[in-house]
């Protein structure tokens, strides 16, 4: 017995600027039941410390995903030939209470994971990764983590609060969601509250690769090392768009100079192929800061690249 | 036996910036079957003479409709208490051949009208009104027309072509789609190719109200006159957003100075309540020329006001 | 003994685009001590339901206030000849907890009011008016209210929460901060959750003037009526920039079509001269939605007009 | 013997977005020789006190003039049936020395006027009107003046300097270029350095009509009065785009709230028909503050309306 | 006998923001007669599949070319010391019929080529390269091709149509315009309709260099290879601005992540010096998606670099 | 005896979008007395040749500096642990007379330098470096210079004028302010008025490193060489933001393609650590050309990096 796999609506069927406002113009689904992977959004920005706007991220990412065709020309990946994928909509967070939103998200992802679908999340500010990791750990036990970001997001508190977009990985660590010797932070840079700030993660056994170590070169070798170190562990990929230099991704809220290029970003995500990816997110896209939509174009493509890297997807290269 | 009427997704269920990318966050439907009224989009701009961009109109109008709540506070209209309404998606026009697109549209609306649903169209450039009127006349016979626009759109040709956004009402007139003494053009202004240009319509018996006649006053009395003259005839409402002054609606392609205000636009649409409206469109929103989205906010609200003015909708005032 | 009154830094002393980033380039002050009136900001947007951005409002309003000169050419008001005025900076709200921010604001205004300075607030989302009114009532007892807004902001809850930018006047009413027969809401319009929504205020004895009642005319007569009805009561003026039509004020988050003009806004504020004004705010300016800064120019001028309308300011007309 | 009159390049010959970058896509000319009227630009902003950008005004006005067709539908004016008109390019001002630029402009206009062509100027900041008026007076003697502006531009000095965009009419007055009882300033408003600021002009016998006197009504009666008072005197029309409310004309540098509408602007310019117009300018368009180009669309149309109002142009109405 | 060579208007003669709206402020010419090379525009976007706007490309490229001075500091090229160059305006395409526009373009270039001038084209969408190549082959026989693009543009059809911006090189190939073993496509990437999509060209003997092969390195060695392979054949250079990463060139319609840098773009164009270049184009600049104009600045400079690489231009390096 | 060192206002004390509009939210100071280093602004753009706007640079740089925290994570520099730093406001230049402004600036810096504080200047157009260098030479004698720029800024005149943003280093050279064999220009590129243009500096003994020499590699080795050559000489660092490729820094006026990356910019500034830096500036940020503010974010960070590189600041690396 065969099942029909969902396909993105093609440009020969409907002009690219028409059709449903879903991710890649895929069919919408009510839940993750029956899916191998799913896209879902979290329209949140109340965990943000500087410029707001990520609450509009999921809508703009979906809108700008409209031109992505089903095959990956760099890797030959053919995700829609192998996986049942749909867009399952947004998490109904509470815009007026961040702490309650964390609980709503955690509960929502427990439900998604109960269907054995791999969630690829359209953010939203980075606070959301904490409740997702909690749900991940509840299902898989502690997970390996590839965290691409300008910031370590390991503050104990911000303005005295435990819940904010600068704290999710500290919280996840406290709750034992992470396999500490399999945590990789890539792209860290900028200024800090203490000059040893990035050493906190290192003290936990994490690998913290600063942006300066990445300049002027390919990150493909780095990813080979990381794959080697992670092995078969379940791994979560959290991609903060501000890891990219603002030249590439202007539409975000906490901009740091001297970041990664999109070429390096693609190398990182493509470099996760072969790992046991159990989920991924793309966070911190703030549409008001990029009216061209190009930051969202990157985000949409990076999410597609995550899909292409999932277990079970065939590749040519 | 009762039916359940579709309702827009509310802000207490999902943040305004989340939820489906449909008009007013209404349910999507595959066809107009079972609907009293429907929203649908035509992502077209290849009939445009100056600035392009209206191919992106339907998506932005839907996006910016996200804040509209179900009740009209000015008129007390409660459309979702009385009509079954859904968003039936977009017309798959041929972006590379304008003439073929006209046929695609005409055929599409014949299908919609076969279900007795009243179509409210999200444009798209004004070329689209010609094939819609053709479908309207096929169902209803010639119709009365309220056409709000800076331009008369009655050119015989543009660059030698019969199909362009400056010609739809000439074509519809040639095909006998209009009841000539029940045609009203409101908001005409600007410069022209002949100084008697607006007199062409007048020669056909049309009422052509220039923008200058509208300045500094309410249009409510004008609408009373128009309702009187139209009586019970089936009437189509075609609203070109460039009828508004660019202060109100910057996001459009063929801008003319000294136009209507949105207050007057609301008076016009609210003034159609009581008529036998058989369809309406809102055209010429060009998102690249209003990155704030406010022109689309107007468009979305004007389409909601059209819905509120349809036969069968109760009102308080 | 005389005191030296603060003056805005003039254009003959420093180019308009230089100088301190304070309101009107006035001196900064540490507290309200010794001041007759003060400007202060609340960089908050976490009470917002749709587009964010008002956390950047105070900075942009101050920036765009740089061109305001000390005399009001319409009224001849000379505020800096009579009042000691300074910019006392911002309220350090908690960006990650809206309910705590409400307490911070209330406490901050109690301190300001202890110095008998009249606070003019640069918002910030409208949630902030609730704690300000609480502080006002603590000092003055219940106050009269002139509330200019597209929205009544009298929801009992939003997404189940009592604290949000759609609820401040319901909360203030619950706490007895308002003199119900001296409450005036001007500019209400748009769509609602119930078609009787604006009647809630009316049931409390409030005067709710819908935008449609204001179209095409001067509001000077309305203000004469309002002054008559308020008499000598202490009165607070809360000005939501979205009361203006988006043509005038695009830079805001919850846009409603068919609003007031800035001419009418000026008539309203100038029409409060002669009242016993005890405070005022200008809220809901969202800079990312108006990169030109013109919405903030309006906001800055409206705050200057409030200053010109305060008791003790001489006028020519 | 007949001459062939230049015509704007039409949309049936070349798409509106193509063709020469001249005003209205008219032929370019090397000088004003043989012309009845001419358009010319002054790419200057170094006289500006707040936001810069008007140096780019002439280019954007020309670009956005591309859609203007040869006939005026409101008045029936047919300028190209009667006048030889061309675009004679730009004045080569010295960007690094404002005072030298004034001399360059004065000399340039003496040359233009030597051909008896009526110059219609695309600004540029308002400083430029002083040297133009000097050239006008050299040819015609003192002239009547219709000056539409938010500002009186009659400062004696700015930052101690006699040459700046806030001083041109003071300088022209000093040089005896104006017929004082035939000077009309329309649209004055905002804040000032002295509360009697606008009275300076009144003391010279000028009519200074503040914006507040213009609100909510047609200015056609005012123009009838002004025509009556000016009679047959040579009259110069200087139109500062900031006379318009920023809702209409956001793209300018010294924004004042509560201004004229474009409808009123059109009434003013159309109301000069019948006068002995000897020249006109449209100044203070700052393209960086209106990337949509709509402010320039207004400017281009207002310059076309000036052309339509010139002596010798036939009208229907 | 000597001829006077046209020179760009210099900044010491006219401010950069003034002067004629021609390419590099060169003289305009009515035709290519007497020219060695010419710039001309094609204001077209009706072959576009996603975002529109390239119809405005030629105007913005010309506008932003205003700062280019006559000498190339990197190569020492001195094109205006050796070639007679002018701007010959725009091709009057039919905006409402893409297929007719193709014929208009082909005919127009046959005329240009009849004068032995090398055309450098300001696009416009990529559809235009097909009719240009047809005219090139009619004059020169099949040509070598250097095609820089994110896309191969070798679709057989789009939406069932043979004429669209994704098909020009398939059409040119069908018509035998190309020397298949001298075709080089550089920068291909993104997603596709088939995972072997780029292999189509390879099957024809073309060299298809994917973007990933270009990352993190100089393309100067690649160009040396290409020059070697092309030898003395006539070669056409078609430069799609979307070959660049959107960080560099945001103003385009079909954005693909992970592209070339402008440094590499310069290396490519400079690397064509020494070849027998017979023409070149720069396509797909969409001004509404880059209001800063910087994408057009790149385009203008790349066209200047093409001019500098033409046969007969002396160089220092 | 200890002194209390000023600290930037932290994000745990005040939301990042609130607080004073000073550089890094540092305390403001009336003068440089008692300071080791100071930030100050020059709101000037009247020396600009193409796009204006740098008069708004200091305000936007200060605004966007709001997120910089006190420690440099790349170098471990801790400037506020060692230096007394404040923001001393803006230089009151004369906007209407460039030559007088030069004198005002020179005088202002003489006063600053009299306090032995190191000035870090927020520009403003590049003309300002001439008077600063004059003051520097008055205090220190001729200085070494690291000048990062797309342009050599060594024109003798522009439009016949000696004072303009293309001439400051020619003027400084004429006045003997520079140690010619210790002058380094980095990033030169684009087009020129003569193909030997960059050789002028070389003839004076300057090192002129063209952008092409910098592509695709780290500039850390170059900086080691430069430090070696400069030795202990007093050195001034003048950083023109247009040295960066416009992908990184779109918000500037005289854009040249193919520039430095911000990574290279950071390497340059960090590479000055260990030198005897006596002052620095960051010029040519034009806010209207980058409404996102990201160009100003770079500028703010580069100024912070200059502070981190000053003598007396401890580093970890
Ligand atoms: Mn993060
Ligand atoms: Mn981050
Ligand atoms: Mn129309
Ligand atoms: Mn129209
Ligand atoms: Mn409100
Ligand atoms: Mn409101
Ligand atoms: Mn003026
Ligand atoms: Mn003015
Ligand atoms: Mn292409
Ligand atoms: Mn392409
Ligand atoms: Mn420079
Ligand atoms: Mn430079």
Image (cartoon, coloured by chain):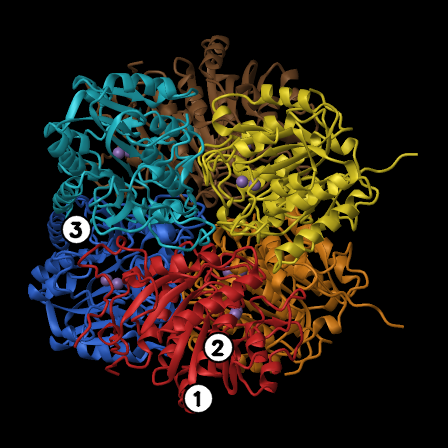
Chain colours: A brown, B blue, C orange, D red, E cyan, F yellow
Cβ of mark 1 under 8 Å from ligand 7: the answer is no
Residue of label 1: D230
Q: Is residue D270 left or right of residue D243?
A: left
Cβ of mark 2 under 8 Å from ligand 7: the answer is yes
Residue F40 spot, x, y in % from top left: 70, 46
Q: Nearer the viewer, residue B172 or A88?
A: B172
Q: Is residue F201 left or right of residue D133?
A: right
Residue of label 3: E94
The quadrant in which the C terminus of chain F is found is top right
Quadrant in which residue A5 is drawn: top left
Secondary element at tag 3: loop
In the image, is residue F187 above or below residue A217?
A: below
| Residue F88 in view of the camera | yes
In the image, is residue A161 above or below residue C213?
A: above
Residue E115 spot, x, y in % from top left: 17, 41
Secondary element at tag 1: helix
The quadrant in which the N terminus of chain F is found is top right
Quadrant in which residue A39 is drawn: top left
Residue D196 spot, x, y in % from top left: 65, 80
Which residue corresponds to the image point at 17% horizontal and 51% vertical from the top-left?
A: E96
Judged by depth in the image, the label closer to the viewer, 2 or 3, is: 2
Tell me which numbered mark, 1 or 2, is placed earlier along the sequence. Answer: 2
**Badge 2 local density, few (<14 within 10 Å), some, or many (20+)?**
many
Q: Nearer the viewer, residue D210 or D181?
A: D181
Q: Nearer the viewer, residue B156 or A85?
A: B156
Work out whether disc 1 and disc 2 sit on a shared chain. yes
Inter-mark Cα distance, 2 to 3: 43 Å
């Amino acid at each position: 017995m065969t099942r029909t796999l969902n396909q993105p609506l093609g440009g020969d069927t409907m002009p690219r600027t028409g059709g449903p406002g879903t991710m890649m113009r895929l069919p919408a689904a009510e839940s993750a039941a029956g899916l191998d992977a799913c896209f879902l959004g979290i329209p949140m920005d109340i965990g943000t410390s500087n410029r707001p706007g990520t609450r509009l991220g999921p809508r703009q990412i979906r809108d700008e995903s409209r031109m992505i065709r089903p095959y990956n020309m760099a890797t030959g990946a053919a995700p829609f030939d192998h996986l049942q994928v749909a867009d399952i909509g947004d998490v109904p967070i509470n815009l007026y209470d961040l702490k309650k939103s964390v609980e709503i998200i955690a509960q929502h992802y427990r439900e998604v994971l109960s269907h054995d679908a791999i969630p690829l999340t359209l953010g939203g500010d980075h606070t959301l990764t904490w409740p997702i990791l909690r749900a991940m750990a509840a299902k898989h036990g502690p997970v390996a983590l590839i965290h691409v970001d300008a910031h370590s997001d390991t503050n104990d508190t911000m303005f005295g609060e435990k819940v904010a977009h600068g704290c999710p990985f500290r919280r996840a660590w406290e709750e034992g969601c992470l396999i500490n010797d399999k945590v990789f932070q890539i792209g860290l840079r900028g200024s800090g509250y203490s000059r040893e700030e990035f050493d906190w993660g290192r003290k936990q056994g994490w690998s913290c690769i600063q942006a300066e170590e990445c300049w002027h070169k390919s990150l493909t070798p780095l990813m080979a090392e990381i794959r080697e170190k992670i092995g078969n562990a379940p791994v979560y990929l959290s991609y903060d768009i501000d890891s990219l230099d603002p030249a590439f991704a202007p539409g975000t809220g906490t901009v740091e100079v001297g970041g990664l290029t999109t070429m390096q970003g693609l190398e990182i995500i493509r470099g996760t192929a072969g790992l046991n990816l159990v989920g991924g997110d793309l966070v911190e896209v703030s549409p008001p800061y990029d009216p061209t939509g190009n930051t969202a174009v990157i985000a949409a493509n990076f999410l597609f690249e995550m899909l292409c890297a999932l277990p079970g997807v065939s590749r040519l290269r």
